[in-house]
Amino acid sequence: MSPSDPSPPAELPQSRAGDALFYLVAIGVGAITGVLGTALHLGVDRALQWPGLLRDHLGPGVDQAQFLLLSGLIAAVLVLVSVWMVRTFAPEAGGSGVQEIEGAMEGLRTVRWWRVLPVKFFGGFLSLGSGLVLGREGPTIHMGASVAQAASEGLKLPTRENRGLLAAGAAAGLAAAFSAPLASILFVIEETRRQFPYGLKTYTGVMLASVTSGIVTQAIAGPRPFMAMTVPAMPLEFLPAFVLLGVVLGFLGVAFNRCLVWSMDLARGIGLRTSFYLVPAVVGFAVGVLLVLRPEATMGGETLAVLLVAENLPLATMAVIVLIRFAMTMASYSTGVPGGIFAPILAMATAFGLLFALCLELALPLPPGAAAALAVAAMGGLFSATIRAPLVGVVLLAELTGAYTVLVPVLLTCLFANFVADWLGGRPIYEVLLERTLRLDGQSRAPSPSAAEPQIGGWDQR
């Protein structure tokens, strides 16, 4: 054997056995995450029927004021119990879990799976079931990473493989939430580009976990696109409209991120002065009332997005929906319960895209189906401007809606939204949230010298 040989032949079987074990574990993580994520998804769908069940229980002659009061109280109780679970058992389970996973992949945070899993599942069930404007992808992503962490600890995987499996679990969680395995794989590439330890083994693990989760999700919930829409192809001369939409969404995305952090800081300030349960109680009560009076102002909004495209609402109504969804997203996320921001972003962006189409129609005639195309493109554009992952935005929307006919317009919108957000100095929302979490915990972005590890993560750019 020449000195240039990379390793002795005797080590190859052991290496291949280790790779095979890692791949099997990734498949298992994907399958378990798919079951948990789909169970949460279907459970929340059933739980959100409680206002109708309450009305049936009270009877047709119930006083409207009494019904609104009971609805508000029930939603407030659900939110408060969810907040209590987070603050008592797993403070890191509040909000979205993406920043916690990114922190863990940098060696800055610890995934305590034994407490995150139950709090994220049951706390997320309560918060999402209350009607708060939150997405189910936050809990499922964090649960997927927790399943991966449990497997990693059980097998005593080294740091590199542990972080690769965390990313695989997170991708599986996103695939379970939206039945979008390809976008979930790309999410790892774009969103965790600074932390993910790139390599054939780790990358294959991400793909296996994501695809397995998608298969399990489709086997349980069905293979239909999550937000199926029929959108015709757009003529080439209409493409500048999508560029303009992307520019506007770049501004909106930066404003969204800053308002989200501001609302969280405001709620925390109120909690420090009074009680950390005050804001959740008020927001929960308001959501319970709105579930009866204005359902479009509540819930994650996946169904709402499809309904808005199908309806032909006037300009003023659409403007009100955009404003109220924006405000309720800020209020809901500031409560600190488990919940993501993907779904609220997509629903609000749909309304904004339709509003943009109505405004554009005042100046020039639109081709058939232009409003639906602009709505789909707006979802990807706002996602790109806030999350700062344009490729994920394009593929996610294709998998969610099945609108492959408008891939080029969506790509243009995502590119320009991302470019404008960067030009304005906007930063990826999960990077900002991670830094905020570390700051509140008295940590710096860099690990302490005693805990420092060799650089494992992938690549980076400005």
Image (cartoon, grey):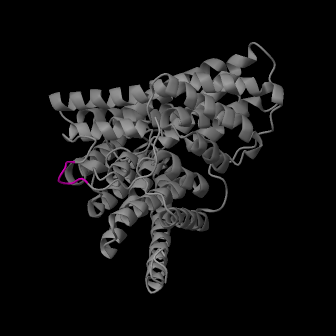
Q: Main structural element of the magenta stretch: helix, strand or loop?
A: loop
Q: At which x and y percent is residue 390?
A: 58, 39
Q: Taking 60 as reference, is 339 left or right? A: left
Q: Taking 440 as reference, is 104 left or right? A: right
Location of residue 362 with respect to 384 vertically, above or below: above
Res 145 → quadrant: bottom left
Q: Taking 268 as reference, is 290 left or right? A: right
Location of residue 54 with respect to 157 vertically, above or below: above
Q: Nearer the viewer, residue 276 or 416?
A: 416
Q: Magenta stretch: residue 449 in it? A: yes
Q: Residue at x 31, y 46 (%)?
A: 94
Q: Residue at x 17, y 53 (%)?
A: 450
Q: At which x and y percent is residue 208?
A: 54, 67
**Residue 67 visible somewhere in the drawing:** no
Location of residue 205 with respect to 239 vertically, above or below: below
Location of residue 81 with respect to 263 vertically, above or below: below
Q: At which x and y percent is residue 98?
A: 40, 48
Q: Taking 14 as reference, is 397 left or right? A: right
Q: Residue at x 40, y 40 (%)?
A: 430
Residue furthest bottom as drawn: 10
**Residue 327 visible somewhere in the drawing:** yes
Q: Residue at x 47, y 74 (%)?
A: 6
- Provide the residue span drawn in magenta: 448-452
Q: Magenta stretch: residue 375 in it? A: no
Q: At which x and y percent is residue 232?
A: 80, 39
Q: Nearer the viewer, residue 107 or 354?
A: 107
Q: How many numbered badges does the structure rendering display?
A: 0
